[in-house]
Structures are given as structure tokens and as C-alpha cells.
Image (spheres, grey):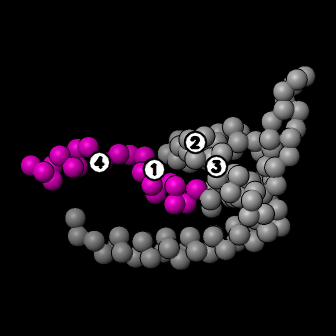
Amino acid sequence: MYRQAIYQTDMKPDVDREMLHGHLELLVLAVLAGGPLHVYALRGMLDERSRHRLRAGFGRLYPLMRHLQHRGFVEGRWAPAGPVRRKRVYRLTPRGRDRLRFLSLAWDRFSAGVDAVMRHRTD
């Protein structure tokens, strides 16, 4: 009975928030490799490219962008967003491209290990 209750409440088709949080830096850098974006557009690209499976909230994205900027992986600049408003547009720096390559290699190793374990499971 306990086991059944866990499965009923925890089985979701979308990726768990903690799994997404652990890989959000890689995903953001990968999206920014395509060109500069503001956070709202970045969130939309993550959502679209993941076929609506990875939904990062602004409460995670804005602090992450500040962190990436502080570490020199992205650069943020103000750009006009109409006659009065402005938006902060982020672009990948050369250091950010290096970080993306590093995280991509780490992801390849990690996902290969997960795949190997999952192939040998007995459901």
C-alpha cells in the first residue's frame, strides 16, 4: 500500500524539478550558444526545444543568470524593449563557451553511465 501511494503521487511525465535544477546551467549555456537572448526568450527556447518537458521558472533562471554573469560565463547588457522599457540580454562569453564544452563532456559521460545502468535493470 505504501509503495502504491508513492508511485501514484511521484510518477510524472515531466522531468523532476531537482533533476532540471542540476542540469540547468548546461541547458542555459547550450541555448545561449545560439545567440543572445533575454531571460523570457531563453525560458521559451528551453520550453520549446524540450517539447515542453523542461519548464524552468523565472525564480531559478534569474539567480542563475546572475551567477553565470558573476563567473564570467555570460555577459548581460541592457537593450531597448520599446520606447521606454529595456530588457537585459545575455550572451555567451568565450569563457562560457569553454564551460559549455566542459559541461557537455561531463553530461556525455554521465548520461552514458545512466544508460548503461538502465539497460540492465529488471522491471
The first of marks 3 and 1 along the sequence is: 1
Measured in 3D between alpha carbons, the distance from the residue under mark 3 to the one under mark 1, in whole angstroms, is: 16 Å
Quarter in which the C terminus is drawn: bottom left
Q: Residue 50 carries which label?
A: none
The residue at 50%/54% (across/down) is 20
Give how far apart the Cα atoms at labels 2 and 3 are: 7 Å
Residue 45 seen in render: no
Task: Check if mark 4's residue and mark 3's residue have beta carbons within 8 Å.
Answer: no
Task: Name the residue at 88% across, 23% down.
Answer: 84
Nearer to us of marks 4 and 3 is 3
Is 7 covered by the magenta stretch? Answer: yes
Q: Position of residue 94 (x, y in %)?
A: 83, 67
Q: Name the residue under label 3.
A: 63
Residue with the mark numbered 2 = 59
In the picture of the structure, the residue carrying the numbered disc 1 is: 17
Mark 4 secondary-structure assignment: helix
- Type of the residue with mark 3: Pro
* The magenta stretch spans residue 3: yes
Earlier in the chain: of badge 2 and badge 1, it is 1
The amino acid pointed to by label 2 is Gly
- Labels 4 and 1: the sequence-earlier one: 4
